[in-house]
Image (cartoon, helix red, strand yellow):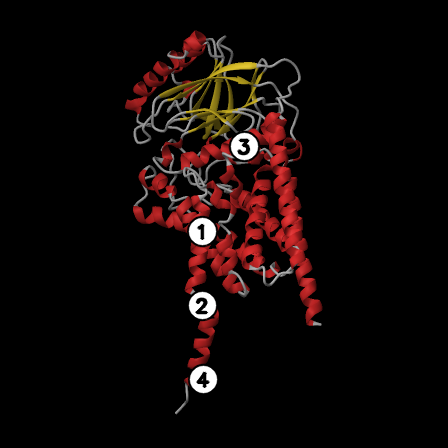
Amino acid sequence: MIDSSPLIVGTELSYRHMAISTRKALLAVLSGTMLTAAFPPGRLDWMAWFAVVPLLISLENEPPSKAFKLGFIAGIVHFLTLIYWIVVAIGHYGDLNSFLSAATLFLLCLYLALYLGVFSVFSAYVEKSRFALLFIASFWVGLEYARAHLLTGFPWCLLGYTQFKNLHLIQIADLCGVYGLSFLIVIINILIYHVFFRHHKRGLGLHKWEFLFTVLMAGLTLTYGHFRLTQGQKGKGPPLHLNSVIIQGNIDQSVKWAPAHQARTMMTYQRLTRSTYGFKPGLIVWPETSLPFFFQDNKEYAPQVYSIARKSGALFVFGSPAYKIIDGKPKYYNRAYLVTPDDQPPQYYDKVHLLPFGEYVPLKKLLFFVSRLVPAAGDFDAGARIAPMRQGKISMGILICYEAIFPELARAHAREGANIFINITNDAWFDMTSAPYQHLYMAAFRTVENRIPMIRAANTGLSAFIGVHGNIIDQSDPFTHEALKATLDISKSPFTFYTRFGDIFAFVAIVMSLIGITSCLFTRRNVKK
């Protein structure tokens, strides 16, 4: 008879080696929960400064396999609680059943959680390095940059966005984008971990170096922020003021595209617009697809649109689907139009960064069973180029919907001469979730990066005027009919460092990460010898 006890014992030892203690798993869950809590609409942004600490504690003395699992757990918890609104968007309004909606959310969260898993492996690997503080924070930034660009990019709620209300801190975005703030937050997380939980294993000299470096970084950030907030906007000439109006129609997404509802939609927008004529607006903005029909050939309502521009005497920007016939086949676009009071031919901008599964289906042959979420005719095609719409001294950089979360798009408009950003969006997809708040405050960073104000018109909210410091000048309530009015200074400022050079800081962080990996590999080889 064969004695199987060694095999059983070996299996048990292997299982114990792979298993994660309950305490460490709970620490990872705590980090994931705190990371989400730091984002809007709550007021717990201060939690970001130590949200990663529990995860770092859980990684102590763990091999790469367990470190990855712990980071993956934190990532799953974080993203499931952060982007839960996807179920609302694709379930309630996209007509997917509950199972497919939940499965879509879970699959996306599995992908996003990989980034925290990889971060945890790297952190555990370089933790004993003298420059762990710098290497780990750099690697976090590198992973955020990767997430923002891989697979069409999904830079939703990068860590730096948690500090949207702290104007003194976010001013560094005109130097290094949101990544600079993410870097500072992670550095402080690591310092807290080292000082309070690793003090007995690291030399006093290292603690002094890390503390001084962190204080220097934080001090310079706050000093620069104070300087930018107290410095006047420097344009090339006299101030250029623009009376601007945002119309928030609050059209129910479930009836938005019904032909029978078009007349009521137009009546709502026209009534709200007429109420602002006494303000003598120079620019009126309606939201994304505020005209739920093809404006380009609509004979019933298009004349009413031109009439609004003539009677108000204002430039008029609005959203509408559009199409072109190319080689006998229609191509559809998510378009923003500009109509002028003097009946010039309309200008337009076609959205260049489309929403996967919302405006087109990537890998359509493979994912043939997946339908789009937008109930319009045909898949959308991406616009051909990024170019502001110009009229006189006004140059409008248009960002349609979630294009506002991609810094490179706003930067491209700024480099082309835009002196005002216009973000038209339809956040009705998100219903009463946290997504509209997150969407607004991410968009605010584009104004800081390029020192260009923004008009943000949202169908159901949150609409807002945003100043060049990321400050909310005025904001609508969600799910209300509103007409917001503000006078904006759109004097063109010189290009910021970020406008000129883009994400150099993120590239430097990636290089630092590679240096960290290489130095640790070299050190370990020497130790083995």
Nearer the observer: mark 1 or 4; the answer is 1
Position of the C terminus, as image quadrant, is: bottom right
Chain-order first, disc 1 or disc 2: 2
Which residue is denoted by mark 2 in the rendering?
Answer: 19
Q: Give percent across and percent down for residue 470.
A: 53, 29
**Is residue 110 in view?**
no
Residue type, numbered disc 3: Leu
* Side (left or right) of 167 relative to 518: left
Q: Give percent across and percent down for residue 307.
A: 41, 10
**Is residue 388 in view?**
yes
Give the Cα separation between the discs numbered 3 and 2.
44 Å
Residue type, numbered disc 4: Pro
Q: Which residue is rendered at x = 51% and y = 22% of the image?
A: 348
Q: Circle 1 — which element?
A: helix
Which residue is denoted by mark 4 in the rendering?
Answer: 6
Give the Cα separation between the discs numbered 3 and 4.
63 Å
- The answer to whether the residue labelled 3 contacts the one labelled 2, judged by CB atoms less than 8 Å apart, is no
Residue 361: image quadrant is: top left
Q: Circle 2 — which element?
A: loop
Nearer the observer: mark 3 or 4; the answer is 3
Which residue is denoted by mark 1 in the rendering?
Answer: 32
Residue type, numbered disc 1: Gly
Q: Give percent across and percent down for residue 357.
A: 42, 40
Which residue is denoted by mark 3 in the rendering?
Answer: 167
